[in-house]
Amino acid sequence: MYNKIFAYILYTLCLVNSASAQAEILKLTTWNLEWLVSQKDIQNTPIPQNVNLRNASDFQQLQQYAIKLQSDIIALQEIGSLETLRSVFPANKYLFFISRDPIAQHTALAVRYSVFAHIEQNPDLTELGNINGSHPLRSGLDVTFYTKEKNSLRILVLHLKSGCQDYPLTNKALKPSCQFLKEQLPILQEWIRKRLMEKQAFIILGDFNRVISPNEFFYKSLSEKITSPTFPTAYQANPCWGGSYFIDGFMLDHHATKWFIPNSLSVLKYKEQGFNQQNQLSDHCPVSIKLSIP
């Protein structure tokens, strides 16, 4: 009798421990919202005159796509402020983090409540934004996530220099853009080196403004110290607005790669396909992957 009771208790404890150790499936997204700024934002930081500001209907439309996206972590680019970001993502469902850049475009994160035990915002990677003294660029948003099972994941949200998507970094015709992107490379390499020394799982994601593949110089330079990195968008065609190769993407180190669910790459396409609708929504679609994190 006592042996049966003991066996039952042991079995119950095993079930509890097994359930607590089960991995949680999380959806991770990057989404460039193309000048998501309000009238209030541009009072403090001016923007180019040719930028189309969203109206209330546009924000409502974007919010519907944000709801449809159903993502747990959304890395965002070209965000004017936290207040403006809340016009797209409901504040009662998401926590928000934003870079501290003194410009109109910021990198940001929206994170679903109760997914992580603790979240810590690290100092921005400001070196990425300081390479052009006369015109500051975007810093990297650096955040560490701690799971309920005491695992941690560090995420760096990027929006790198535009204008050199598939040219050699030494291209003379586009030298300013390509040179700036080239100067951002060693800054990222140093950030990666520190994470590798710490043995910290990490994902770099966002708008790389670069068509990146494992045989391309920029990617090879980023990943040369990482054992078996994963770049899910490499060699993939992006169906957004007629299709092209991805410049939005994810780079996972070998620790985070263990959590990556293969073939989970997805793109939420807009049902609207006209040029005017592109201005109202964004020239980028949300790009997502899934992770299974214990």
Image (tube, rainbow, N blue to C red):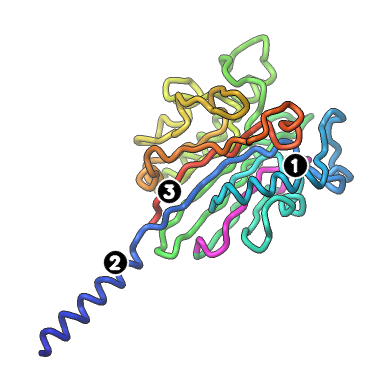
Q: In this view, does 197 lie above or below 182?
A: below
Q: In which quarter of the image is residue 138?
A: top right
In the rendered view, tell whether residue 107 sits above or below residue 144: above
Which residue corresponds to mark 1?
36
Q: Residues within 10 Å of mark 3 (few under 14, many from 20)?
A: some
Query: Could you say where residue 26 lies in the image, as x and y percent from the top left?
Result: 46, 52
Give whichever of discs 3 and 2 has the lower sequence position: 2
- Residue at 82% across, 38% down: 53
Amino acid type, residue under disc 2 in the picture: Ser
Residue at point 70% right, 43% down?
A: 106
Quadrant showing the C terminus: bottom left
**Residue sticking out furthest to the front:** 271
Does 115 appear in magenta?
A: yes
Q: Which of marks 2 and 1 is nearer the N terminus?
A: 2
Q: Are marks 2 and 1 in contact (CB under 8 Å)?
A: no
Q: What stretch is highlighted in magenta?
A: 100-116
Residue occupying image coordinates x 79% and y 29%: 134
Q: Where is residue 282 in the image (x, y as percent from the top left)?
A: 69, 35
Residue linked to disc 3: 291
Amino acid carrying mark 3 in the image: Leu
